[in-house]
Image (spheres, helix red, strand yellow):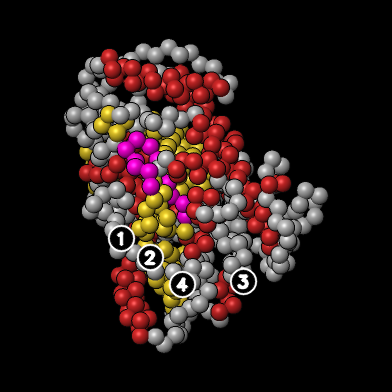
Amino acid sequence: MLACLGRSWKRAAGPRPRFSRDPTLGSTAVDCRRPVRVTPSLHHRWHRWHRWHRLGETIGLLSFAFPLLFVAGCASEVPDPPNVVFVSLDTTRQDHLGIYGYERDTSPHLDALGGRGLVFDRAVAQMTITNPSHATMFTGLYPRTHKVGENSRKLADDFLSLPEVFKNHGFSTGGFVSGHPLRKQITGLSQGFDHYDSEMQRRRNGEDTVARAIEWLAQLRAAETENPFFLFVHFYDAHGPFRYRAQFNDDFVSPEPGKRAAFVQEYQEITDIDGNPIEFENHFVDRYDVGLRYQDEQLGKLLNVLDLNDTLVIVTADHGETLFERATQLNLNHGTSVFQEQIRIPLVFAGPGIEPGRNDRLAETTDLLPSVLDLLDWNDTFPYPLEGESLFSETGRSSRSPAFASNRARTKQHSDRGYQLNHESFIHSVQTTQWKLIRYPGLEQEYLELYDLVADPLEAENLVPVEDERLANVLPGLKQLLAGWSGDIEMGEGPELSPEDIEQLERLGYVN
């Protein structure tokens, strides 16, 4: 149960929204009748005025001029649930953030938020492709179930998504995204949003996206709406090609250039301020960190307009990025690997009722939706079993729960190990807090890799060929876990991609 401004919050009395659903994931019928409302007390009227007045004060500092008049309408018998803000940081490695021990100052605003919230140290993305990963966040389902296995696949309307749940509970819902893969015409993730802002050419700066989100909040306030809001903001500033940012570029300069990059993805070819091609590894890493710092600055602008005493904030990433940890075309890329630098992501919950601290249990992006439902006491409003588990329930994810990930199989990204992969199938992995097993689908045989994540966090030594009694005891159990979970992803329906869509996805490295 969430504490809101020192008081406990619970669902308003009256019927919950009801859902009926075909168990085979057919059509969904929704009865969206709102809970019964009663006249608010004077204390609750102040609570509503305080929420928008605090937001208005901050927005006013950003030159949004709106009247401070407030007319209290019908309200619930008890204080409203908190506003909820969900932030996704595209292509953001966990180990390049200060809150996770990175020595560079890439994330001061996220670090400060984590200091007042709960930080998950072992959060894992289930796929390292933008659209599928967000579909998992929004549905609590693995890609094999929601069938979005590529950026060119659309989430079917049959699936109930997180924004729809909020809308059914009376929230105003707004989504603001920054990358072409999440455009409304492509993803299917816009369902449930009152306003979904995704019009752009390829990508847009976080500064623009945040400005649009703040404007939407100001419009809610000007309309004197009494509904709480759910806001989704997606940043794309760390995604390649890594951009030059004048205000931060000089803050991230390696003393040595490092090795010359043996291979650079075509879409990652970038230049320095003088127009000369960047060719050395450390210079690419510098530019990646510049993007993280710029992104964090925009996150700070968003957080500054929120009343964090009355807002549940969730920050995570859809995936990370391989920089120069690998020997092949995996470098400066994501989407065809399940190595840790691509699947380990940040995850922070902060706001009313969240005790500050750190959690070292494994967490998945499938767990986000059930965790939100649990925090808001909405668990029984979901119409079908979720595959994720609440991170806040005693009966949810435990310290013994494993984490899974999958990705498309491509031979050229793994040719240094002699693998000939079946491109119609998927790479799968399972990990515990110590061990990780990866299975690659070959044309004639499968390939297995086993890593001790404690002794070898960079996954440099495959232990499968090693003869060791301890490993002989570990491997069968991991194989059994993976066999019970994995399966090829039967792709759902794809949207009608325009020539412009294909061109933009190609320039972002998503279409070969």
- Residue 287 in picture, x, y percent from top left: 67, 52
Quadrant housing residue 366: bottom left
- Residue 349 in picture, x, y percent from top left: 39, 44
Q: Is residue 353 magenta?
A: yes
Q: Inspect this view and state whether residue 192 appears.
A: no
Residue position marked by numbered label 1 in the rendering: 399
Q: Amino acid at mark 4?
A: Ala
Residue range (magenta): 345-357
Q: Is residue 294 above or below residue 325?
A: above
- Asked whether the beta carbons under mark 1 and mark 2 sit within 8 Å of each other, the answer is yes
Q: Amino acid at mark 3?
A: Thr
Q: CA distance from mark 2 to mark 3?
A: 27 Å
Q: Amino acid at mark 1?
A: Ser
Count the marks.
Answer: 4
Label 4 or label 3, whichever lies nearer to me, is 4
Q: Is residue 186 magenta?
A: no
Q: Amino acid at mark 2?
A: Thr
Residue position marked by numbered label 4 in the rendering: 455
Name the residue rendered at 56%, 31% in the picture: 211
**Label number found at residue 471:** none
Question: In the drawing, does residue 105 fall left or right of residue 38?
Answer: right
Q: CA distance from mark 2 to mark 4?
A: 12 Å
Name the residue rendered at 45%, 44% in the picture: 114
Q: Is residue 440 above or below residue 300?
A: below
Which of marks 4 and 1 precedes in the sequence?
1
Which of marks 3 and 1 precedes in the sequence?
3
Residue position marked by numbered label 2 in the rendering: 433
